[in-house]
Amino acid sequence: MTAWARRVREAAREVAGPDVVIAFSREGQRLIATGGTAPEPPEGRTHQRYEIGSASKTFTVLLLAALAHTGRVSPHDPVRAHLPPGVRPDAGRAGPRDPLRARRPPHTLPHRSHPGAATLAHLATHTSGLPRLPHDPAYWRQALPAWHTNPYAHYDTGALLAAFARHRPRHRPGTRWRYSNFGGALLGQTLAHTCRTTYADLLTDRVLTPLALCDTGLHPGVPGRDATGHRRDGTPLPPLRMTGFAPAGAVRATPGDLLTYLEAHLTPARTPLGGALHTVRTPVLVRGVRHRQAHTLTWFHDGDGADPVYFHPGATPGQEAFLGFRPATGTAVAALTTRAWTRSSTLGSVARGLLE
């Protein structure tokens, strides 16, 4: 057994949770290690699909890049140009913290300012001026009773667009970085409206099928197909269901499919989406003062130009995920656990350690 294979197996034992899966690829060689306290399900943990939460946004932004490379849209298009007539920002009020979290470092001001209306690129890079969640009483009425289970299940695309129509940005687009599930969801639904289809069908046609991601989707499957999430106290949770917010956090995939997805980012030229994959690897902004953080259109980006590490964490009410890759060493890791994120979670640090 190689040293890196031993380390991957040790990593799977270091993370707490009922089910833990660490899927690792190094120059095309794969290893999927499991851990956790739950008994092995009949079909095996490695064949179940796991919820990846906010890491789903990397799929949505890759979709944007793929459509841009065909000329269907441009990242610099105003958002309103791709929405039904009458959808224009207005005003709103903040609500409580979002359960579809993406762990990230503190932030201050990002890259250069972009005057004018919010663009598709602003939505992708969290610089649109939109809040984390809609300032919409209708959203909070349905979300709060299900905050720790399924807060997005009944908020559809029409409600999302109506909330955008009522929103008035507090900051000019491009002047501040503020992580926004609202913006990520709006981006995906905007692309779907432009292509006159649903987000699920558009993502399947333009990203999942070209990359041969046969075990990746947006909706819960038959019983036993998807891993069961758990609260912090170990209580099982129902599968995550999302409608209007699907582009921001609904992706569920097997560990093998997640490795295929990350390996495509390592070797874009070997895939049908080479140009789009190169686009989403290019840094476009830097934020922070003391702790500088670079970003591509969708990936957090650490390291210098010769040896960067790309990553994106995510979580749902009952599961946590970390996706990352490092082109210089040909390595990729998808780390998954079926327990709600806590401040003491080690999944992200353990997975980063495998890349570094």
Image (cartoon, rainbow, N blue to C red):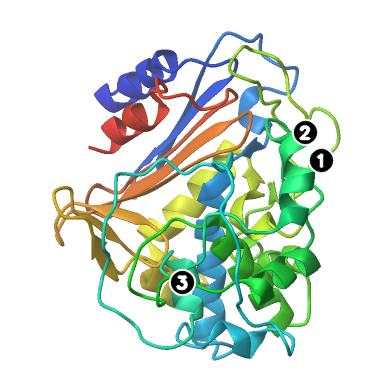
Instruction: Measure how far apart labels 2 and 3 are at the Cα level.
Output: 37 Å
Name the element at disc 2.
loop
In the image, is residue 70 above or below residue 62? below
| Mark 2 neighbour class, 10 Å CA radius: few under 14, some 14 to 19, many 20 or more | some
Horizontal and vertical percent position of residue 176: 34, 66
| Mark 3 neighbour class, 10 Å CA radius: few under 14, some 14 to 19, many 20 or more | many
Q: Which residue is mark 1?
A: 221
Whether pointer 1 and pointer 2 mark residues with C-beta atoms closer than 8 Å, the reply is yes
Q: Is residue 73 visible?
A: yes
Type of amino acid under label 1: Gly
- Residue drawn at x 61%, y 90% is 81
- Kindly identify which numbered label has been placed on residue 225: 2
- Kindly identify which numbered label has been placed on residue 128: 3
- Residue drawn at x 42%, y 23% is 345
- Residue drawn at x 34%, y 65% is 296
In the image, 33 versus 153, the foreground residue is 153
In the image, is residue 5 above or below residue 76? above
Instruction: Measure how far apart labels 1 and 3 are at the Cα level.
Output: 34 Å
Please give left or right for residue 33 compared with residue 188 in the image.
Answer: left
In the image, 206 versus 128, the foreground residue is 128
Horizontal and vertical percent position of residue 100: 58, 42
| Mark 1 neighbour class, 10 Å CA radius: few under 14, some 14 to 19, many 20 or more | few
Type of amino acid under label 2: Arg
Name the element at disc 3.
loop
